[in-house]
Image (cartoon, helix red, strand yellow):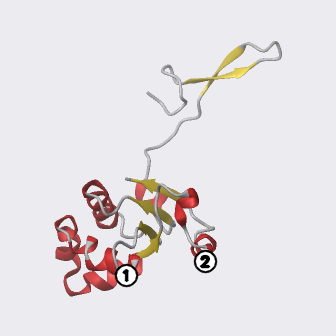
Amino acid sequence: MSGGGAKNGLSGRPSALGSPVAVPAPPRGPLDVTAALRGRSILFTGATGFVGKVTLSMLLHHYPEVGKVYVLVRAGTGGSPDARFFGKVAQGRPFDPLRARHGAGFGAFLREKCVAVGGDVSDPLFGLAKEDLERLGKLDLVLNCA
């Protein structure tokens, strides 16, 4: 099946009379996820849950050339988003493959790639502070695991 959107690989475009005309979809090569994510800025939600931890760890493990990953984290009781992410979330077992790959450089790698931002997916605009919204103005994608 090609990427044209229809089962037969044809996309429908309206003719002058308004009825669709079958037009062959342009050929596409295989998706290069590494190239697609290289240098991209991502807002990642749900990193404190198990699926989010696994997904974030796999993203960083398989695509280390990704740009910044802004990780949305509720501060929790008495702690900052930074302390919760780097002190609790990133210490979980789903990050073991990254720890094994980077060894003593794991913390530096994680801090180079990830920025914890305070917010809540249930709030308008994720409850982000104005400064964080400005910092996130040039996002390439949102990866929602919440």
Please tell me which of labels 2 and 1 falls first in the chain: 1
Residue under the point 19% across and 82% down? 103
Q: Where does residue 35 sit, x and y in percent of width and height?
A: 46, 60
Q: Where does residue 52 sit, x and y in percent of width and height?
A: 31, 58
Q: Residues within 10 Å of mark 2 (few under 14, many from 20)?
A: few
Amino acid type shown at disc 2? Glu
Instruction: Name the residue nearer the viewer: 65 or 140.
Output: 140
Residue under pointer 1 = 111
Instruction: Name the residue nearer the viewer: 17 or 99.
Output: 99
Quarter of the image holding residue 107?
A: bottom left
Q: Secondary structure at mark 1?
A: helix
Residue under the point 48% across and 63% down? 43
Q: CA distance from mark 2 to mark 1?
A: 19 Å
Residue under pointer 2 = 131
Instruction: Name the residue nearer the viewer: 78 or 82.
Output: 78
Instruction: Pick the quarter of the image with the N terminus.
Output: top left
Quarter of the image holding residue 100?
A: bottom left
Say whether residue 66 is visible.
no
Q: Secondary structure at mark 2?
A: helix
Q: Using the image, tell me which numbered label, if any, was put on residue 120.
A: none
